[in-house]
Image (cartoon, rainbow, N blue to C red):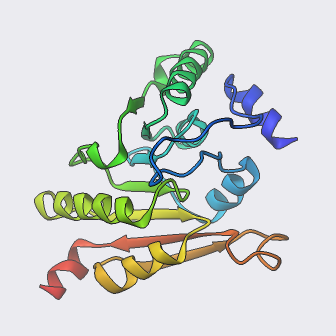
Amino acid sequence: MKEYYYDKLLNIKTVGEQKGFNESLHYHRYEPTPYSALEHLFNQYEMKSGDHVVDFGCGKGRLNFFINYMFRASVVGIELNETYYLDAIQNRKNYLKRYGKNYDKIEFLCCPAEEYEISDFDNRFYFFNPFSVQIFMKIINHILRSFEKEMREIELVLYYPSNDYIYFLENQTAFELKQEVQLPGLYKENPNERFLIYVIKVLDFTKRK
């Protein structure tokens, strides 16, 4: 019921079957994060209005609108599939009709995730297994180069995290696990039903160097 409740509240359409596959085998089929999972995450994970969030594989924009509504943070959704991108654009129009310019910090781009140029302001990055570890590695390296250019605290939020993502972060990058949020009633049956938050801090990075 929360799927329909929040879609109605936000004046968007993200529920229903997600049809179609990406042509590239490196990009996985889109599936939105359940609203109940987002509720649980943000009951335990802090986000602020000054944060700049990038959602890789944003689909129709569910996460973007939820975060913007709850925290008024800036959000960018990156989507390769043009159909989903156009759905996200329409959702943005409908969302802003209801909530106006006070919430107008939402952007969507239709492009391969690895081509997105990391902004110096981007500091929160969300992944729900949108693509292969090879593309994930490219994006993390882009984030790290951005970090070295403009040092700030950066956090990665992984939902349903793949072992390949975890291994790469923990063995080949300066990111460290900050927090784990397990979904009640689901995690015991499926240990993938969790969020992992990784962080890289300026102080920690300078110590390493």
Count every numbered label the image shows and give the total: 0
Q: Quadrant of the C terminus?
A: bottom left
Q: Is residue 75 left or right of residue 205?
A: right
Up-down: is 209 above or below 109?
A: below
Identify which residue is drawn at 49% across, 45% down: 57
Identify which residue is drawn at 67% across, 25% down: 12
Identify which residue is drawn at 22% across, 72% down: 202
Question: Where is residue 76 shown, x and y percent of the image?
Answer: 41, 38
* Depth order, front residue of 104/143: 143
Q: Is residue 80 left or right of residue 14?
A: left
Question: Where is residue 83 shown, x and y percent of the image?
Answer: 54, 25
Please, which residue is most extreme toward the top here?
A: 97
Identify which residue is drawn at 58% across, 32% down: 60
Question: Where is residue 91 shown, x and y percent of the image?
Answer: 59, 22
Q: Quadrant of the N terminus?
A: top right
Q: Is residue 145 left or right of residue 129?
A: left
Up-down: is 36 above or below 85?
A: below
Up-down: is 101 above or below 124?
A: above
Please, which residue is most extreme toward the right here?
A: 1
Query: Residue 155, located in which quarter of the rendered image?
Result: bottom left
Q: Is residue 205 left or right of residue 134?
A: left
Question: Where is residue 146 shown, x and y percent of the image?
Answer: 19, 57
